[in-house]
Image (cartoon, rainbow, N blue to C red):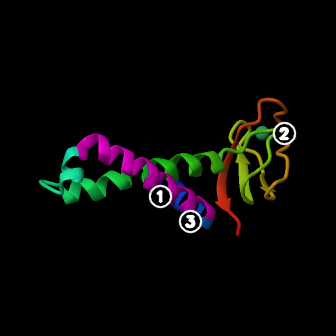
Amino acid sequence: MFKSLKIFFQAAKEKELLITAFKVALVVGVILNLINQGKNIINFSNLNLTKFILTFFVPFGVSIYSSTIMRLKIHVGNRAKIKVKVKCLNCKGGELIIEKDQIVEECVNCGDKTKYKVIEIIK
Ligand SMILES: [Zn+2]
């Protein structure tokens, strides 16, 4: 569990991913704030500043989470988005290093039943 969290946070700590999440938070946060307390924003009255700020964190978190999960999905036939060390969950076979942008190949033991799990992110 803690190892998975460590891998998740390593993958999430990418500049390009954080910039995208920031942009999403800005656009979606403004829209959500207008929906939730638009009148108060326009009138500058009874504006709940805590809600206003927290509303930006929701799309930021969702963006970071979903793009990190996508980066960590290593499917046969697709290009790896980051350099990783994986292990086949099907045969519990040996570990394999996949380079960034390398097309992921099947496990030598499992063929089309290959199911990789990221066990390390390599910088
Ligand atoms: Zn295998």
Q: Which residue is mark 1?
A: 2
Q: CA distance from mark 3 to mark 2?
A: 28 Å
Q: Position of residue 32 (x, y in %)?
A: 34, 44
Q: Is mark 1 within 8 Å of ligand 1?
A: no
Q: Which residue is mark 3?
A: 13
Mark 2, Cα crowd under 10 Å, few <14 / some 14-19 / many 20+, is some
Q: Could you tell me which residue is drawn at 66 percent across and 44 percent down?
A: 73
Q: Amino acid at mark 1?
A: Phe
Q: Which residues are magenta?
A: 16-38
Direction top: furthest residue: 112
Decide if residue 117 is on the left or right side of residue 102. Answer: left
Q: Position of residue 8 (x, y in %)?
A: 54, 56
Direction left: furthest residue: 46
Q: Quadrant of the C terminus?
A: bottom right
Mark 1, Cα crowd under 10 Å, few <14 / some 14-19 / many 20+, is few
Q: Which residue is mark 2?
A: 106
For marks 3 and 2, give the one nearer the viewer. Answer: 3
Decide if residue 5 is on the left or right side of residue 90. Answer: left
Q: Is residue 76 above or below residue 102?
A: above
Majority secondary structure of magenta residues = helix
Decide if residue 82 is on the left or right side of residue 59. Answer: right
Q: CA distance from mark 1 to mark 2?
A: 28 Å
